[in-house]
Amino acid sequence: MSTLTVRLTEREEQDLQWACEQSGKTKSEVVRELLAESLRGYRLRQALQASHAELGAAARQSGWLTEDDILQNVS
């Protein structure tokens, strides 16, 4: 495991302390969980953006502009 030093504002420190008190977890545990959750969301957004960039033009050429268009052709 590696170590990361992060500077927090006073408000962020208070919020982190509150999360620790509510969860019964250490600051490190709370930060690791929140970071992992945030990174999963970031990776998903990046994958969706890449898919959109790759498939968007082809979908528009096929007349697929909305989810309803797709569902009509697939059903």
Image (cartoon, rainbow, N blue to C red):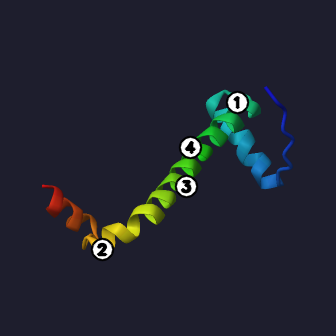
Q: Residue at x 32, y 73 (%)?
A: 60
Q: Amino acid at mark 1?
A: Glu
In the picture of the structure, the residue carrying the numbered disc 1 is 29
Q: Of the numbered discs in the image, which one, if any, rests on residue 40?
A: 4
Helix or strand or loop: what does disc 1 sit on?
helix
**Which residue occupies the foreground of this view, 14 or 63?**
63
Q: Earlier in the sequence, mark 2 or mark 3?
A: 3
Q: CA distance from mark 3 to mark 4?
A: 10 Å
Give the crowd class for mark 2: few <14, some 14-19, many >=20 residues within 10 Å.
few
Task: Select label 2 or label 1 by which is in front.
Answer: 2
Q: Earlier in the sequence, mark 4 or mark 1?
A: 1
In the picture of the structure, the residue carrying the numbered disc 3 is 46
Horizontal relation, residue 39 to residue 28: left or right: left
Give the number of marks.
4
Q: Earlier in the sequence, mark 1 or mark 3?
A: 1
Give the crowd class for mark 1: few <14, some 14-19, many >=20 residues within 10 Å.
few
In the picture of the structure, the residue carrying the numbered disc 2 is 61
Q: Earlier in the sequence, mark 2 or mark 1?
A: 1
Q: Residue at x 69, y 41 (%)?
A: 18
Give the crowd class for mark 4: few <14, some 14-19, many >=20 residues within 10 Å.
few
Q: CA distance from mark 2 to mark 1?
A: 48 Å
Q: Residue 11's image quarter? A: bottom right
Q: Amino acid at mark 2?
A: Gln
Whether pointer 2 and pointer 3 mark residues with C-beta atoms closer than 8 Å, the reply is no
Helix or strand or loop: what does disc 3 sit on?
helix
Q: Residue at x 56, y 43 (%)?
A: 40
Helix or strand or loop: what does disc 2 sit on?
helix
Q: Residue at x 71, y 38 (%)?
A: 31
Q: CA distance from mark 2 to mark 3?
A: 23 Å
User: Where 15 falls versus 36 (above or below)?
Assistant: below
Q: CA distance from mark 4 to mark 1?
A: 17 Å
Task: Select label 2 or label 3 by which is in front.
Answer: 2
